[in-house]
Amino acid sequence: MDGLDGLGVAYTSGLKSSDSLKLWHSRLGHLNYSSMLKMGQHGHGIPRFPATKNPFCESCTVAKMARKISRTPTTRTTQKLELVHSDIGYIPTPSLRGAKYYVTFTDDYTRFRWVYPMAHKSDFEATFYI
Protein backbone atom coordinates (compact mmCIF):
# COMPACT_ATOMS: atom_id res chain seq x y z
CA MET A 1 0.00 0.00 0.00
CA ASP A 2 1.41 3.38 -1.02
CA GLY A 3 0.38 6.76 0.38
CA LEU A 4 0.93 9.22 3.21
CA ASP A 5 1.03 8.55 6.92
CA GLY A 6 -0.66 10.82 9.49
CA LEU A 7 2.30 13.23 9.48
CA GLY A 8 2.26 13.76 5.72
CA VAL A 9 5.33 11.58 5.15
CA ALA A 10 5.32 9.57 1.94
CA TYR A 11 5.86 5.84 2.14
CA THR A 12 5.95 2.96 -0.28
CA SER A 13 5.11 -0.68 0.27
CA GLY A 14 7.99 -2.09 -1.67
CA LEU A 15 10.68 -1.63 -4.26
CA LYS A 16 9.86 -1.59 -7.91
CA SER A 17 12.38 -2.76 -10.45
CA SER A 18 12.91 0.84 -11.58
CA ASP A 19 13.85 2.08 -8.07
CA SER A 20 17.54 2.76 -7.66
CA LEU A 21 19.82 4.75 -5.41
CA LYS A 22 20.31 7.38 -8.13
CA LEU A 23 16.55 7.69 -8.68
CA TRP A 24 15.92 8.25 -4.96
CA HIS A 25 18.80 10.73 -4.88
CA SER A 26 16.94 12.78 -7.53
CA ARG A 27 13.55 12.36 -5.82
CA LEU A 28 14.95 13.73 -2.56
CA GLY A 29 16.38 16.88 -4.11
CA HIS A 30 19.92 15.53 -4.52
CA LEU A 31 20.34 14.64 -0.86
CA ASN A 32 23.78 13.24 -0.07
CA TYR A 33 24.04 9.47 -0.30
CA SER A 34 25.10 8.78 3.30
CA SER A 35 21.99 10.55 4.61
CA MET A 36 19.82 8.56 2.22
CA LEU A 37 21.34 5.28 3.46
CA LYS A 38 20.70 6.32 7.09
CA MET A 39 17.09 7.22 6.27
CA GLY A 40 16.64 3.80 4.70
CA GLN A 41 18.00 2.10 7.82
CA HIS A 42 15.60 4.01 10.07
CA GLY A 43 12.53 3.22 7.97
CA HIS A 44 11.60 6.68 6.69
CA GLY A 45 9.85 5.33 3.60
CA ILE A 46 13.07 4.99 1.63
CA PRO A 47 14.16 1.50 0.62
CA ARG A 48 17.31 0.02 2.11
CA PHE A 49 20.13 0.08 -0.37
CA PRO A 50 23.36 -1.86 -0.03
CA ALA A 51 26.36 0.26 0.91
CA THR A 52 28.00 0.65 -2.48
CA LYS A 53 30.09 3.27 -4.19
CA ASN A 54 28.02 6.43 -4.72
CA PRO A 55 26.82 6.80 -8.31
CA PHE A 56 27.98 9.85 -10.24
CA CYS A 57 25.45 12.72 -10.38
CA GLU A 58 26.18 15.33 -13.05
CA SER A 59 23.66 17.81 -11.58
CA CYS A 60 25.41 17.79 -8.20
CA THR A 61 28.80 18.28 -9.84
CA VAL A 62 27.62 21.25 -11.90
CA ALA A 63 25.91 22.83 -8.87
CA LYS A 64 29.12 22.68 -6.83
CA MET A 65 31.25 24.42 -9.46
CA ALA A 66 32.41 27.90 -8.56
CA ARG A 67 32.01 30.58 -11.19
CA LYS A 68 34.78 33.12 -11.46
CA ILE A 69 33.41 36.64 -11.12
CA SER A 70 35.14 39.39 -13.04
CA ARG A 71 35.48 42.59 -11.03
CA THR A 72 36.41 44.67 -14.06
CA PRO A 73 33.54 46.51 -15.75
CA THR A 74 32.63 45.39 -19.23
CA THR A 75 32.67 48.96 -20.54
CA ARG A 76 34.72 51.81 -19.20
CA THR A 77 33.93 55.49 -19.64
CA THR A 78 36.58 57.80 -21.09
CA GLN A 79 35.55 61.18 -19.71
CA LYS A 80 33.97 62.80 -16.66
CA LEU A 81 30.18 62.63 -16.28
CA GLU A 82 29.80 60.38 -19.31
CA LEU A 83 27.98 57.89 -17.07
CA VAL A 84 26.55 58.68 -13.62
CA HIS A 85 25.10 56.02 -11.32
CA SER A 86 22.46 56.93 -8.72
CA ASP A 87 21.00 55.19 -5.70
CA ILE A 88 18.41 56.05 -3.06
CA GLY A 89 18.93 54.96 0.54
CA TYR A 90 16.91 55.04 3.76
CA ILE A 91 18.09 56.59 7.04
CA PRO A 92 16.41 54.90 10.05
CA THR A 93 16.83 58.00 12.27
CA PRO A 94 15.71 61.25 10.60
CA SER A 95 18.23 64.10 10.48
CA LEU A 96 17.68 67.35 12.39
CA ARG A 97 16.08 68.81 9.25
CA GLY A 98 13.80 65.79 8.80
CA ALA A 99 15.65 63.92 6.04
CA LYS A 100 14.80 60.22 6.05
CA TYR A 101 16.30 59.38 2.66
CA TYR A 102 19.41 60.20 0.70
CA VAL A 103 20.39 59.99 -2.95
CA THR A 104 23.90 59.35 -4.22
CA PHE A 105 25.31 60.20 -7.63
CA THR A 106 28.58 58.50 -8.60
CA ASP A 107 30.63 59.47 -11.64
CA ASP A 108 31.77 56.27 -13.38
CA TYR A 109 35.03 57.74 -14.66
CA THR A 110 36.35 59.57 -11.56
CA ARG A 111 34.33 57.58 -8.96
CA PHE A 112 33.52 60.95 -7.35
CA ARG A 113 30.32 60.75 -5.32
CA TRP A 114 27.73 63.36 -4.36
CA VAL A 115 25.27 62.68 -1.52
CA TYR A 116 22.05 64.69 -1.03
CA PRO A 117 19.57 64.30 1.86
CA MET A 118 15.83 64.11 1.09
CA ALA A 119 12.76 64.21 3.34
CA HIS A 120 10.71 61.97 1.00
CA LYS A 121 11.50 59.56 -1.82
CA SER A 122 9.36 61.72 -4.07
CA ASP A 123 11.96 64.50 -3.68
CA PHE A 124 14.34 62.59 -5.97
CA GLU A 125 13.26 64.34 -9.15
CA ALA A 126 13.82 67.79 -7.63
CA THR A 127 17.23 66.68 -6.30
CA PHE A 128 18.18 65.19 -9.67
CA TYR A 129 17.74 68.54 -11.45
CA ILE A 130 19.92 70.55 -9.04
Image (cartoon, helix red, strand yellow):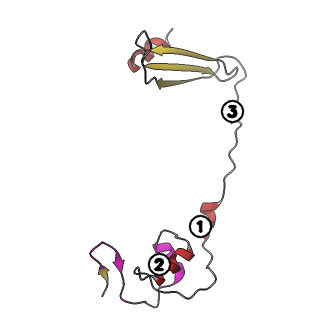
Q: Give the foreground label among 2 and 3.
A: 2
Q: Residue at horizontal 46%, vertical 74%?
A: 27
Q: Is residue 35 above or below residue 104?
A: below
- Identify the disc placed on residue 39: 2
> Label 3 is placed on what type of residue?
Thr
Q: Is residue 42 above or below residue 125?
A: below
Horizontal and vertical percent position of residue 32:
55, 71
Give the labeled residue for mark 1.
60
Q: Considering only order in the chain, which callout, 1 or 2, is on the residue closer to the N terminus?
A: 2
Q: Quadrant of the N terminus?
A: bottom left
Q: Considering only order in the chain, which callout, 3 or 2, is on the residue closer to the N terminus?
A: 2
> Label 2 is placed on what type of residue?
Met
- Quadrant of res 93: top left
Q: Is residue 80 magenta?
A: no
- Identify the disc placed on residue 75: 3
Q: Is residue 65 above or below residue 59?
A: above
> Label 1 is placed on what type of residue?
Cys
Judged left or right of residue 5, residue 33 is right
Marks 2 and 1 sit apart, C-alpha to C-alpha, by 20 Å
Q: Considering only order in the chain, which callout, 1 or 3, is on the residue closer to the N terminus?
A: 1
Total labels: the figure holds: 3
Marks 3 and 1 sit apart, C-alpha to C-alpha, by 34 Å
Dot 1, how many residues are within 10 Å of its Cα: few (below 14), some (14-19), or many (20+)?
A: some
Marks 2 and 3 sit apart, C-alpha to C-alpha, by 52 Å
Q: Which residues are magenta?
A: 4-29
Q: Main secondary structure of the magenta part?
A: loop
Q: Give the foreground label among 2 and 1.
A: 2
- Quadrant of res 94: top left
Horizontal and vertical percent position of residue 111:
67, 22
Q: Are marks 2 and 3 in contact (CB under 8 Å)?
A: no
